[in-house]
Amino acid sequence: MDKLKTALTLIAVILVALVALAAIGFVYTALQFLLLFGIICLGAVMVLRFLMKPSPRQLDAPDPERELRKVERTLEEYKRKHLLK
């Protein structure tokens, strides 16, 4: 009975080790697939960026220099109006 118990325990340990190795292999394969998928997606995005024409600049887009010039012009107008009074 003692030898049977030892043999069954040994078989159980071997089966658990095999299941653990299979799980590790599955995780490793999934990570490789995700890495490959990420590299393919990155390459596709880079190709699309190189092939697509840049979109034309919108006229309403905020332009910091333009806004600064507008503020400076407004300030100059205020100064002229107040100095004339």
Image (tube, rainbow, N blue to C red):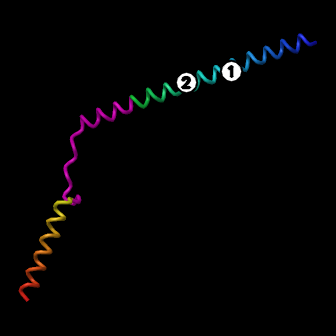
Residue type for callout 2: Tyr
Instruction: Measuring from the top left, give residue 33's x and y in whole percent.
Output: 49, 26
Mark 2 neighbour density, 10 Å: few (under 14) some (14–19) many (20 or more): few
* Mark 2 element type: helix
The residue most toward the right is 1
Judge whether 55 appears above or below 16 on screen: below
Q: Quadrant location of residue 36?
A: top left
Q: Is 69 on the left or on the right of 51, as rendered?
A: left
The residue most toward the top is 3
Q: Is 42 on the left or on the right of 35, as rendered?
A: left
* Mark sitting on residue 19: 1
Instruction: Measuring from the top left, give residue 13's x and y in whole percent.
Output: 76, 18
Which mark is first along the chain, 2 or 1?
1
Q: Quadrant location of residue 52?
A: top left
Q: Quadrant location of residue 62?
A: bottom left
* Mark 1 element type: helix
Residue at the location (51% across, 28% down)? 31
Whether residue 51 is in magenta: the answer is yes
Instruction: Measuring from the top left, give residue 8's x and y in whole percent.
Output: 83, 15
Magenta segment range?
40-62
Give the CA distance from mark 1 to mark 2. 14 Å
Q: Is 29 on the left or on the right of 76, as rendered?
A: right
Quarter of the rendering occupied by the N terminus: top right
Whether residue 59 is in magenta: the answer is yes
Quarter of the rendering occupied by the C terminus: bottom left
Pointer 2 residue? 28
Instruction: Measuring from the top left, give residue 57's x and y in whole percent.
Output: 19, 52
Residue at the location (79% across, 14% down)? 10
Residue type for callout 1: Val
